[in-house]
Image (cartoon, rainbow, N blue to C red):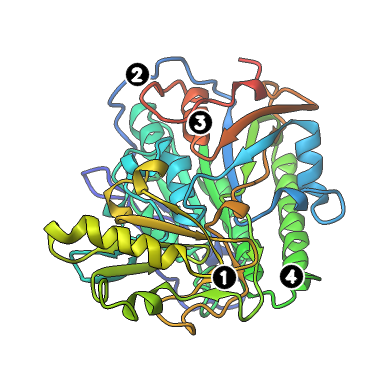
Amino acid sequence: MCTSGNASHRPTTITRREALAGAGLLAAVGATVLADPAPVWASPVRPVADDLDVYVIVTDGMRPDELNPVQAPTLHRWAAEGTRYSQASSIMIAETLPNHAAMVTGVLPARNGVPSNSIWDHAVGDERTLDRPDDLRAPTVLDRIRTEAGLTTASVLSKDYLHGLFGGRASVQWAPFPLVPITDHSLDWFTIEALKQTVTDHSPRFTFVNLGDMDRFGHMDLSGTSLRLARNQAVYNSDHKLWEFEQFLRSTGRWDRSVLIVLADHGMDWSEPMSLISAAGAIDADPAIRGRFGVAQNGGADTFAYLGPAHERDASLRRLREVVGGLPGVNRLYDPAELHLGDRAGDLIATCHPGWRFSDPTPLSNPIPGNHGHEVTLGIPFFVGGGHRIIRRGQVVDRPVWTVDVGSTVARLFGLDHRSMDGAPALEAFHL
């Protein structure tokens, strides 16, 4: 079920699985790769409890209103029996990669290097996805727990680009398989089966999990503005798989060891077919800024990178603000520094109104109705549940929390120094 890493203690990984046959299906779905035992580089600030297993479970794209007993009975029960945060939010830009990066690093994009799913990369002269291991510029709790506390960590991530971004960070990694064509994600059925197999084989003390069905089916739901048929079914199905995971933890005696930190990375908004914004077209139509900006389209947000002469940058940005800000459906314009996004976010960020979407470089580039990245998709569910005795029961906390707070919360549970992180631990959820 696993192979060993090399002498440098870096994990190895498998990018795709062998062809599956008969009873080998479950074993292949759950196949993982284990690194050599990690050296302990530093002693934890506080001792780590021997009976503590922490799972961060990201229900990708889930909205706060979907955390209800009809659509998500298991998640609703976990939240009611633990500590729920009623004012939880993504960070901007409200997309998958920046919010997962914030969760595992505990720092904002300006420090971890991941401001959005896609950026305009000056080095390649084109838009690209941040899906390479070296795109993540900050330490993560996956590698810090492994190296500083000497404990096994695991990543079980349903999306291929997430697996790419976090490659080499955890002791144990599952490469998502089989991948659904177009969506490049593995269905939650396979992901939960892989999670159970990973726990069975390796007993990781910290596990980072992404479940992608809610997001992927939400993007494609043509009834999203009204019935949300595909989306609602995806929420219910994913919730049922999590019920199965709970039964697995209980039947194997692991429930009482478990802390479950459950949240979404962003919400979801739906638009009508013609409610789209083509900023690239407007730029091309203006002689003053034509050819001066590279555009990276992120659904509910666009990022713009200046490509012209340095001495004309300020004038070009002023004109860009006039052109893009005047387009129907555009909500706000931001300087990347306002959002702590860093240099990779380019020179200007534009977001859309609810019910709209960006489609660049052409009006046909983004035909999907479900999108996120803009302000209306910032709200998320966020709660701490599980069976461990340290969890505070039956409370709702009204103070604001963000995805970036996950990293410091996990670090605190494992006794690691988190003072340099941008997030704050969710201490209200625990008897510590």
Q: Position of residue 309 (x, y in %)?
A: 13, 63
State whether residue 204 appears in this view.
Answer: no
Q: Amino acid at mark 2?
A: Ser
Q: Which mark is residue 225?
A: 4
Residue at the disc numbered 2: 43
Question: Pointer 2: residues within 10 angstroms few (<14), some, or many (20+)?
Answer: few
Q: Earlier in the sequence, mark 4 or mark 2?
A: 2
Residue at the disc numbered 1: 24
Q: Tell me the distance, in whole angstroms, between the alpha carbons under discs 3 and 4.
A: 36 Å
> Left or right of 8: which side holds 413?
right
Tell me whether circle 1 and circle 2 mark residues in contact (CB < 8 Å).
no
Q: Amino acid at mark 1?
A: Gly
Q: Position of residue 324 (x, y in %)?
A: 42, 66
Q: Earlier in the sequence, mark 3 or mark 4?
A: 4
Q: Residue at x 39, y 21 (%)?
A: 419
Quadrant in which residue 289 is drawn:
bottom left
Q: Tell me the distance, in whole angstroms, between the alpha carbons under discs 1 and 3.
A: 34 Å
